[in-house]
Image (spheres, helix red, strand yellow):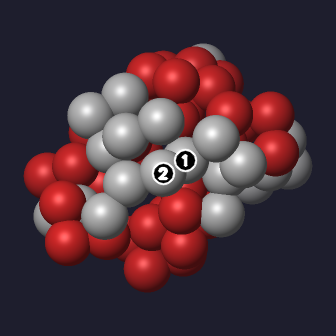
Amino acid sequence: MKWTEVQEIAIQLSERHPETDPAKVNFVDLMKWTMALPEFDDDPKHCGERVLEAIQQAWIDEVA
């Protein structure tokens, strides 16, 4: 899984952190949690604020 797979990342984060409000997750934790996903395999240098915002919004939409 790569940083561009925002929807899949959001689904997996919602499954791994069901009690977490994604709107309250800071970007440092969001990046760490994403990179810790078992299927994730991408360079941290390819991640930026826009990518993290997209992941966070997709996660919010996933649990809404």
Residue 29 horizontal/vertical position (percent): 54, 75
For residue 41, above or below residue 1: below
Query: Mark 2 — residue?
Result: 41
**Depth order, front residue of 22/31:** 31
Q: Are marks 2 and 1 in contact (CB under 8 Å)?
A: yes
Residue 26 horizontal/vertical position (percent): 46, 73
Name the kind of residue labelled 2 in the image.
Asp
Q: Secondary structure at mark 1?
A: loop
Residue at horizontal 47 percent and vertical 36 percent from the top: 1
Residue at horizontal 64 percent and vertical 41 percent from the top: 39
Q: Which disc, if any, is residue 28?
A: none
Name the kind of residue labelled 1 in the image.
Phe
Residue 57 horizontal/vertical position (percent): 37, 36
User: Alpha-carbon neighbours of circle 1 within 10 Å: few (<14), some, or many (≥20)?
Assistant: some
Residue at horizontal 55 percent and vertical 47 percent from the top: 40
Query: Mark 1 — residue?
Result: 40
Q: Is residue 51 left or right of residue 9?
A: left
